[in-house]
Amino acid sequence: MGSDFTIDQKRYLEGFVSGAKAVQITRGAAPAGAPAAAAEPTGPDAASLKAMARFEAEGKKLSPEEKGKREELGLDAYPRMRTAAHEGVFPKGPDVLRWKYHGLFHVAPAQDSFMCRLRIPNGILTHWQFRGVADIASAHGGNYTDVTTRANLQIREIPATDGIAVLEKLVDLGLTAKGSGADNIRNVTGTPTAGIDPQELLDTRPLAKEWHHYILNNRDMYGLPRKFNVAFDGAGTIGALEDTNDIGFQAVEVKDGFGVAPGIWLRLALGGITGHKDFARDTGIVVRPDEASDVAAAIVRAFIDTGDRTDRKKARLKYVLDAMGFDGFLTLVEKKLGRPFTRLPAEAVAPRAEADRLAHLGVHAQKQPGLNYIGVGLPVGRMSVEQMHGLADIAARLGDGDIRLTVWQNLLISGVADADVAQACTAITALGLSTQATPLQAGLVACTGSKGCRFAAADTKGTARAILAHCEERLDLDGPVNIHVTGCHNSCAQHYIGDIGLIGARVAINDDGDTVDGYHLFVGGGFGADAAIARELYRDVKAEDAPAVVERLLKSWLAHREEGEAFAHFTRRMDPDALKALAEVA
């Protein structure tokens, strides 16, 4: 294109041409003035293109995101991304979504920069990869990284010129960011203590890695209408929160006498999306571990065919299941799979051991004699580059060399010999980090918040730190309490499953329309065997008042609970008005 065009004009024309090509692909090229001949889409994008066309044939309007994907799928935008990096410009319009297919998020206006989100199957990486990510964050980012609630890492404050350099350096480390954002299958999570857990039924690492590579190497896995989450839980000491995922594979022991080989299978749960107040539900189906990727792929392909392409708020698997019913959807999945599922009654499955809500912090014995893992607390998931270098050194010198990220926004150093535990803990403390499993620190989760995300209504990480500092010096808790602080209704911090959940809101402070950071506060959430959706207790709590409100709630629990009663159970049995009344006098 000629030099007389601006960058934005060039992109508009490129998008127009790309859209014209997409129309030719879906309709078939036709002579000027002649009606377009219908042509069946072919190739790996065919299923998603057919789904888009079906909605339009029904007289419905595709969402702008779907139109953008049809014009040019984000996977194909890499050459233009390189040009944009050379010119030092950020994406605009549909390109904002397209860049996310490669793991680059333009997070303006919160930060006029990129955030890069990685893909780390099962959340496990080597000490040298961990150090390499730190070096990338130092050279191209804000000198820190964040651990996410999908046991992943994010690098922030990346200039427009440096996004491609970050992506390519990650590949040099044996890592990738491909498909970590936009309408894709997100980071594959698994049990953090996989392979070292005395309690586990199944090592989830091979399953997570196989599914991870399946996604990367099958283009049709990128044709989804919205994002998709998959987790493998091996029934270990630290839970993977698999029931909050679209697909949750749960390791179970199948008993003898039910027509299938007894042993360890995976129970299939579907439809988790706690931001929309739903957990994954047991389907009654069990899957052999070696067929998990095939089953997951068939489910994803069925979702590509049926997911909503017109309403982004309803374009998740939950709403397909609501519309079709579990039986209807699973019948379609069986057709994709090419064989029937194995279904068993609940009594065929032995009870699973419960996860320990404090086991992701502190020193714990591994199933390998004489070895331990150490859970390291990271304040709301953030680490400086210097701390990352120090942790990598500890893992290499005193551990087995692995760094294991958890959904609780912290990490584990595994393979530490009994004789080296004290030295490792001292070195961790010297980095300004802790290995102590205090009840509040163990359960404190916060999303990025308004300082790094354009959707957030409040500084969640700042509020979470304030709650921890305020309450730990005033309360002596004898049991875990999970506090989840999220910035918006995307609920990245999953506020609905917290004992106490806070979601960001702008709170009016006068009649002139001025607002400050604030929250709506929920109580009584849970997960796993205690799964429950929290209910709203307070609206429009100013951020500066949130620590004191949380303190009063916890004090009222300590003063009025029944013997051994957990906080969530206490709040569930109390009438909201009565609970607020108790908190006011606490």
Image (spheres, rainbow, N blue to C red):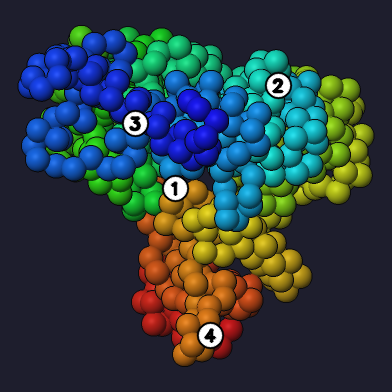
Callout 4, which amino acid? Ile
Q: Quadrant of residue 251?
A: top left
Callout 3, which amino acid? Phe
Left or right: residue 34 compared with residue 499: left
- Residue at image x 34%, y 26%? 17
Q: Secondary structure at mark 4?
A: loop
Whole-angstrom CA distance, mark 3 to mark 1, is 47 Å
Q: Pointer 1: residues within 10 angstroms few (<14), some, or many (20+)?
A: some
Whole-angstrom CA distance, mark 4 to mark 3, is 46 Å
N-term mark: 3 or 2: 3
Q: Position of residue 450 (x, y in %)?
A: 58, 59
Give the label, 1 or 4, closer to the camera: 4
Whole-angstrom CA distance, mark 1 to mark 4, is 35 Å
Q: Secondary structure at mark 3?
A: helix
Whole-angstrom CA distance, mark 4 to mark 2, is 47 Å
Residue 4 visible in the shown view: yes
N-term mark: 4 or 2: 2
Q: Position of residue 495 (x, y in %)?
A: 47, 57
Give the label, 3 or 1, closer to the camera: 3
Left or right: residue 184 compared with residue 344: right
Q: Is residue 15 above or below residue 460?
A: above
N-term mark: 1 or 4: 4
Q: Quadrant of residue 22?
A: top left
Residue linked to disc 2: 169
Residue linked to disc 3: 16
- Kindly identify which numbered label has been placed on residue 509: 4
Q: Are marks 4 and 2 in contact (CB under 8 Å)?
A: no
Whole-angstrom CA distance, mark 2 to mark 1, is 37 Å
Callout 2, which amino acid? Lys
- Residue at image x 63%, y 73%? 547
Judge by depth and name the residue closer to the eye, 250 or 73: 73
